[in-house]
Amino acid sequence: MGALSIWHILAVVVVVALLFGGRGRISGIMGDTAKGIKAFREGLKGEEEAHEEEPAKPLPKTRASTKAKG
């Protein structure tokens, strides 16, 4: 039980090859995930720049607000 047999080593090699293979499914998914995270960060930067460019405008005065004061 304590020693690794050839079947254990082969199973580990197969799992490692699937996870870290050059064109494997997992590596493709990880690449797509990285692209998604990068696009998300760029989107957040774009929102911050948009908020900085447009200062807040005051609300227009209405009849109700002028009657309450006077």
Image (cartoon, grey):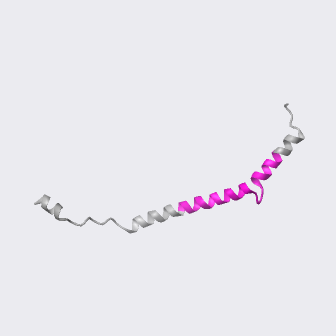
In this view, the residue farthest toward the front is 64
- Give left or right: position of 70 versus 57: left
Q: Which residues are magenta?
A: 12-41
Give above or below for 1 relative to 11: above
Give above or below for 8 relative to 45: above
- Residue 25 image-quadrant placement: bottom right
In this view, the residue farthest toward the top is 1
Give above or below for 28 relative to 16: below
Q: Position of residue 28 (x, y in %)?
A: 70, 59
Magenta span includes 13: yes
Quadrant containing the N terminus in the rendered view: top right
38, 59: nearer the viewer:
59
63, 32: nearer the viewer:
63
Quadrant containing the C terminus in the rendered view: bottom left
- Residue 36 image-quadrant placement: bottom right
Q: Residue at x 30, y 66 (%)?
A: 57
Q: Position of residue 38 (x, y in %)?
A: 58, 61
Q: Residue at x 37, y 68 (%)?
A: 54
Q: Position of residue 37 (x, y in %)?
A: 58, 58
- Give left or right: position of 16 versus 54: right
Main SS of the magenta part reads: helix
Q: Number of numbered discs present?
A: 0
In this view, the residue farthest toward the right is 6
Magenta span includes 14: yes
Q: Residue at x 85, y 40 (%)?
A: 8
In this view, the residue farthest toward the left is 70
- Residue 41 image-quadrant placement: bottom right
Q: Residue at x 86, y 34 (%)?
A: 3
